Amino acid sequence: TVSQLSFTPYFSTLSGITLGYTIGICTGFILAPIASHCIKAHNGYNLYNIGFAAGLFATLLMSILRAVGIEFETRMIWNTGSNHIFSILLIIISSYLILIGLFHNSDPKEKLMYIIKQPGRLVS
């Protein structure tokens, strides 16, 4: 949204950049309290809490911008191909991390059981 507001044809260059930076800074201050409140929405079981909060805030912000007449075109960017390369890379990195975990820890089975016994809720 910062880039969209900064370089939109609705405002002059200086006004757009100023508005974009202002919205970006305000978003930084607003997003943390929204994220801490969103924990109650999913009872702390969401690993992507800040993404959930950012999605809620972005929906609100885009609704406000559309209400005042500022429209942004929807862009669907899809990538096709490159799956073979990324699959090999993912297998190599995952295998490497598993091997490090097995050889670095003194008792990996005990630590795995400790992780499995955790409830999965955020500590905050």
Image: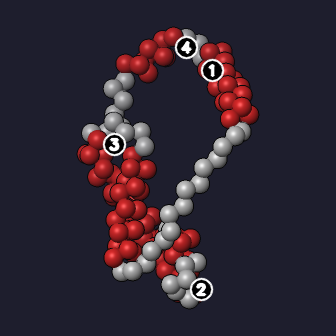
Element under label 3?
loop
Is the C-beta separation of discs 3 and 2 under 8 Å?
Answer: no
- Specify which label sits upstream in the sequence, 3 or 1: 1
Q: Which residue is mark 2?
A: 13
Mark 3 → mark 4, Cα distance in angstroms: 27 Å
Q: Which residue is mark 3?
A: 124
What's the residue type where badge 4 is placed? Pro
- Residue 99 point in image, percent of width and height: 66, 18
Residue 98 is marked as 1
The C terminus is located in which quarter? Answer: top left
Q: Quadrant of residue 23?
A: bottom left
**Image point (37%, 39%), residue name:** 46
- Residue 122 point in image, percent of width and height: 36, 37
Q: Which residue is mark 4?
A: 108
Mark 3 → mark 2, Cα distance in angstroms: 41 Å
**Image point (68%, 35%), residue name:** 83
- Residue 15 point in image, percent of width and height: 53, 87
Between 72 and 38, the residue placed more toward the observer is 72
Element under label 1?
helix
Element under label 4?
helix
Are there few (<14), some (14-19), or many (20+) residues within 10 Å of tag 1?
few
